[in-house]
């Protein structure tokens, strides 16, 4: 399973997204607001989710701002950190 | 989500004008704290009678002092405005001249260090009680870890925070809750990095993520984000309050520790018991220092 798939599975399972399957999540759709529709509570869960599933913590706020945009940007960040 | 809509009636905006604030800041520069207190005496008298100030302070004073007669209400309104004014002057003096004395005991520092040593980050939960901003400014002196403070300013707010007088960077990282998910991520990052996150537990921000808990005899809406953060990161919550004990003198107290178990989900009601712990501590605080509770809006409004 690649990073994007693992990420989408984790989003659906751990954020308990209702009526959404991993296949429904578009790679470039915004995570917050329009798109996946996550809110600020989900944002907290998302930070924890990345740590729990990929062992990564993100200390730089600017880096986080760029990564937590879409599945594409978050997966790219994770892949870069894991490389 | 079962979040309750919060009343959006509080504002960080001062009732005073830019000119009035400027006069105080100049007076502090020229004549120091005593000169500012002298002017404040008359300003506080005016605020004791000013309809907007009366309207804003009445809900708390009615709850805290039920049954007070006309002169009792007048006296309490005066004490609240006078104490609030002196706290603001002290804050400005702290910013302009750096002149304030803070009493943080070794026991309190030891408690903060012990909770922080758990390695999950630490949430310092405070309230708009006493000189809370000045109190938070002293924390980085005692703690080697990065400190972040959740702080919002309304557009057009002219009252300066103490660190804005010098033009220097604040001794902590500011997180504006108005940034929504971005600020939530910054809060979680702070805790993930085993940092200290200071936030307020008594005022909701925006329209959601609140739960209703009793406070002084009726329910108020308080944010449940601190408890949600604690549940998801494992960070303990230390309730940290500050009081003005004299001109330029601040003492701090740790009212208690709140631990929130994991796996509570997103339902507001799941966090209400922990928010209730906090408001119970706040009730003890306003019982001991009734004129140092600075929430000038109707918290009990539904």
Image: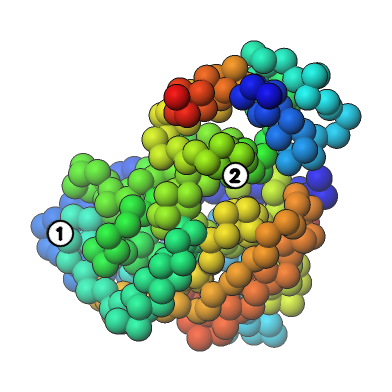
Q: Within 10 Å of the Cα at label 2, are there few (<14), some (14-19), or many (20+) other Cα atoms?
A: few
**Residue at 79% in and 60% down:** B269
User: Residue farthest to the left?
Assistant: B30
Compared to residue B129, the image places residue B6 above or below, namely above
Compared to residue B281, the image places residue A15 above or below, namely above
Left or right? Give the position of B165 relative to B181: left
Q: Secondary structure at mark 1?
A: helix
Closer to the camera in the image, B48 or B32: B32
**Residue at 63% in and 53% down:** B232
User: Quadrant of the rendered structure where residue B302 is?
Assistant: bottom right
Quadrant holding the N terminus of chain B: top right
User: Quadrant of the rendered structure where residue B74 is?
Assistant: bottom right
> On what subunit does the disc labeled 1 rest?
B
The total number of labels drawn is 2
| Residue B39, horizontal then vertical, whole percent | 27, 64
Compared to residue B45, the image places residue B192 above or below, namely above
| Residue B153, horizontal then vertical, whole percent | 45, 43
* Marks 2 & 1 on one chain: no
The label number, if any, that marks residue A16 in the structure image = none
Q: What colour scheme governs how the chains and residues are painted in the rendered image of this protein? A: rainbow
Can residue B152 be seen? no
**Residue at 36% in and 54% down:** B147
> On what subunit does the disc labeled 2 rest?
A
Q: Mark 2, mark 1: which one is toward the viewer?
A: 2
Residue at numbered disc 2? A52
| Residue A21, horizontal then vertical, whole percent | 83, 26
Rounded to the nearest whole Å, what is the CA distance between mark 2 and mark 1?
47 Å
Residue at numbered disc 1? B97
Q: Are marks 2 and 1 in contact (CB under 8 Å)?
A: no
Closer to the camera in the image, B262 or B106: B262
| Residue A34, horizontal then vertical, whole percent | 71, 21
**Residue at 18% in and 51% down:** B26
């Amino acid at each position: 399973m690649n990073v994007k798939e693992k990420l989408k599975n984790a989003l659906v399972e751990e954020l308990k997204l209702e009526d959404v399957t991993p296949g429904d999540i578009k790679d470039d759709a915004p995570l917050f607001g329009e798109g996946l529709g996550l809110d600020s509570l989900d944002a907290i869960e998302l930070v924890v989710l990345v740590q729990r599933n990929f062992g990564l913590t993100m200390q730089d706020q600017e880096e986080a701002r760029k990564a937590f945009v879409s599945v594409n940007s978050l997966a790219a960040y994770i892949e870069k950190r894991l490389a | 989500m079962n979040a309750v809509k919060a009343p959006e009636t509080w504002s960080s905006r001062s009732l005073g004008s830019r000119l009035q604030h400027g006069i105080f800041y100049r007076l502090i520069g020229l004549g120091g704290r005593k000169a500012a207190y002298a002017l404040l005496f008359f300003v506080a008298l005016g605020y004791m009678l000013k309809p907007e100030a009366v309207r804003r302070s009445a809900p708390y004073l009615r709850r805290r002092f039920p049954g007070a007669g006309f002169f009792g209400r007048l006296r309490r309104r005066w004490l609240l405005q006078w104490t609030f004014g002196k706290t603001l002057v002290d804050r400005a003096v702290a910013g302009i001249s750096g002149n304030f004395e803070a009493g943080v005991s070794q026991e309190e520092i030891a408690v903060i260090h012990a909770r922080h040593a758990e390695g999950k980050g630490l949430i310092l939960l405070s309230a708009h009680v006493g000189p809370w901003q000045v109190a938070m400014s002293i924390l980085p002196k005692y703690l080697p870890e990065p400190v972040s403070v959740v702080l919002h300013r309304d557009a057009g707010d002219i009252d300066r925070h103490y660190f804005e007088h010098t033009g220097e960077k604040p001794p902590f990282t500011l997180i504006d809750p108005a940034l929504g998910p971005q600020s939530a991520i910054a809060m979680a990052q702070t805790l993930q990095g085993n940092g200290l996150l200071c936030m307020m537990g008594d005022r909701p921000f925006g329209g959601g993520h609140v739960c209703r808990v009793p406070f002084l005899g009726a329910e108020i809406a308080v944010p449940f984000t601190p408890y949600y953060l604690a549940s998801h990161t494992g960070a303990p919550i230390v309730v940290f309050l500050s009081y003005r004990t004299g001109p330029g003198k601040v003492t701090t107290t740790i009212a208690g520790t709140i631990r929130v178990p994991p796996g509570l989900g997103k339902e507001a009601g799941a966090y209400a018991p922990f928010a209730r712990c906090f408001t119970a501590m706040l009730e003890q605080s306003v019982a001991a220092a009734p004129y140092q509770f600075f929430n000038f809006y109707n918290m009990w409004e539904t």
